[in-house]
Image (cartoon, rainbow, N blue to C red):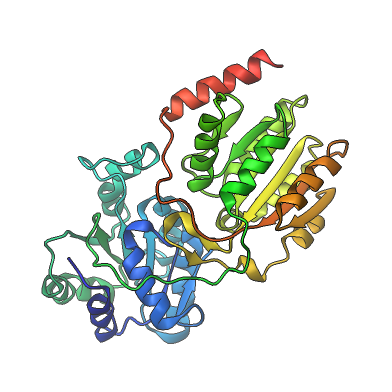
């Protein structure tokens, strides 16, 4: 196993002292270490999405002549392909970048359905992108990484090419966890329960991560079926667009999108489309804990953002904000006769149950039961 502090020390020795990316659970010890060491600011920036992180590293290189490190889960390669191929590639600006990529869905290693395809193609994709890579395993020593830098990566970087470390599961030793201060006490799970208890037969589209898992478990606990819920298990940042597509084509249904702050920040432009489309059956709920809680608790910038003002500027007809159970119930009651799009921000605490389970049904089964509900109740 690799010690994150030793890994960062090696990076610094190679004049790599700028870090940006989107947190990943497999890279949590690394993310904990750099956040505790450098904070979040000039030397370390948690980007809204992985493509933004590549562009930030490019800007850093243009300003300083130095090389930045971009960290991400391998699912984020999809967001990063465009700036990798059309900005930093040797056929364009030849901006060298070091990537640290958490390998979810590695072939032969059990993982969730949304990671399997990306896991299968990760190394092939890096080859296609002409990114020199080295896979870090539990047996890798810091001396091995040092040798890779000297023997392979140095020359590639000098040529303006990019390189990548691909980290298998469990390669980094645990570090002191970074804990982002959050002053709110209402849990996300309790907020979800209150919403589900008060919206009747309305349709729910939930964002990826623990939000969807908490919805699934609560339906089970209440002996309810899951046919009204579309649980987005991947595609972070796109739940609201899925919900908009449903709302526009099923106008008799009220559609609730349960979103997260990291998800909204990843693709904030979706709010402009929702507001300008004016779907009167659309309710957009932001469960805001100001962290990427599903992948380790690294902070977002959400505690500095007035999302209600953004929603108003984008054209949402009504905006609400609360942090209490009573407030959620009052808002739901108030909007029953109001047209959407409606935006509701609920400030919640960071954290979740240690025994939180995962859906027992497959994504395809979720899709089929959800579509059957919409077809039957048209």
Q: Is residue 7 above or below residue 242?
A: below
Left or right, residue 2 beside residue 180? left
Q: What percent of the width, then of the height, locates residue 299?
A: 52, 68
Q: Quadrant of residue 91?
A: bottom left
Q: What percent of the width, then of the height, locates residue 45?
A: 48, 74
Left or right, residue 245 beside residue 6? right
Q: Quadrant of residue 169?
A: bottom left
Q: Residue at x 46, y 63 (%)?
A: 297
Q: Could one spot residue 314 in this view of the protein?
A: no
Disc tally is 0
Q: What percent of the width, then of the height, locates residue 272?
A: 73, 52
324 or 291: nearer the eye? 324
Q: Could one spot residue 26 in this view of the protein?
A: yes
Outermost residue, top direction? 376
Q: Quadrant of the N terminus?
A: bottom left
Q: Quadrant of the C terminus?
A: top right
Q: Quadrant of residue 301?
A: bottom right
Left or right, residue 180 beside residue 117? right
Q: What percent of the width, then of the height, locates residue 215?
A: 55, 38
Left or right, residue 49 beside residue 67? right
Q: Residue at x 77, y 59 (%)?
A: 308
Q: Residue at x 42, y 27 (%)?
A: 361
Q: Residue at x 84, y 37 (%)?
A: 336
236 or 183: nearer the eye? 183
57 or 326: nearer the eye? 326
Outermost residue, right direction? 337
66 or 228: nearer the eye? 228
């Amino acid at each position: 196993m690799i010690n994150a502090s030793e890994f960062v020390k090696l990076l610094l020795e190679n004049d790599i002292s700028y870090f940006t990316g989107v947190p990943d659970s497999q890279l949590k010890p690394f993310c904990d270490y750099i956040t505790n060491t450098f904070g979040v600011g000039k030397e370390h920036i948690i980007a809204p999405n992985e493509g933004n992180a590549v562009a930030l590293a490019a800007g850093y290189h243009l300003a300083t002549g130095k090389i930045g490190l971009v960290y991400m889960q391998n699912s984020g390669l999809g967001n990063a392909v465009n700036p990798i191929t059309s900005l930093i590639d040797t056929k364009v600006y030849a901006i060298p970048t070091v990537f640290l990529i958490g390998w979810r869905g590695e072939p032969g290693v059990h993982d969730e359905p949304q990671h399997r395809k990306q896991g299968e193609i990760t190394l092939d994709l890096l080859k296609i992108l002409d990114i020199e890579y080295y896979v870090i395993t539990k047996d890798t020593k810091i001396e091995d990484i040092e040798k890779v830098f000297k023997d392979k990566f140095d020359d590639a970087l000098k040529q303006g090419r990019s390189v990548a470390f691909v980290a298998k599961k469990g390669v980094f030793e645990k570090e002191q966890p970074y804990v982002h201060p959050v002053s709110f006490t209402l849990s996300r799970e309790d907020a979800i329960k209150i919403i589900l208890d008060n919206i009747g037969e309305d349709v729910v589209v939930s964002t990826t991560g623990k939000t969807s898992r908490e919805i699934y478990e609560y339906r089970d606990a209440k002996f309810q079926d899951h046919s009204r819920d579309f649980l987005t298990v991947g595609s972070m940042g796109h739940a609201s667009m899925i919900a908009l597509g449903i709302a526009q084509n099923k106008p008799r249904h009220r559609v609730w999108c349960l979103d997260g702050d990291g998800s909204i920040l990843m693709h904030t432009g979706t709010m402009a489309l929702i507001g300008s489309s004016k779907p009167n059956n659309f309710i957009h709920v932001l469960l805001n804990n100001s962290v990427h809680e599903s992948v380790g608790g690294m902070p977002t910038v959400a505690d500095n953002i007035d999302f209600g003002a953004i929603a108003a500027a984008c054209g949402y007809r009504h905006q609400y904000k609360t942090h209490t159970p009573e407030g959620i119930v009052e808002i739901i009651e108030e909007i029953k006769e109001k047209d959407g799009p409606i935006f509701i921000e609920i400030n919640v605490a960071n954290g979740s149950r240690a025994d939180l389970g995962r859906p027992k049904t497959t994504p395809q089964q979720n899709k089929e039961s959800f579509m059957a509900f919409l077809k039957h109740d048209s």
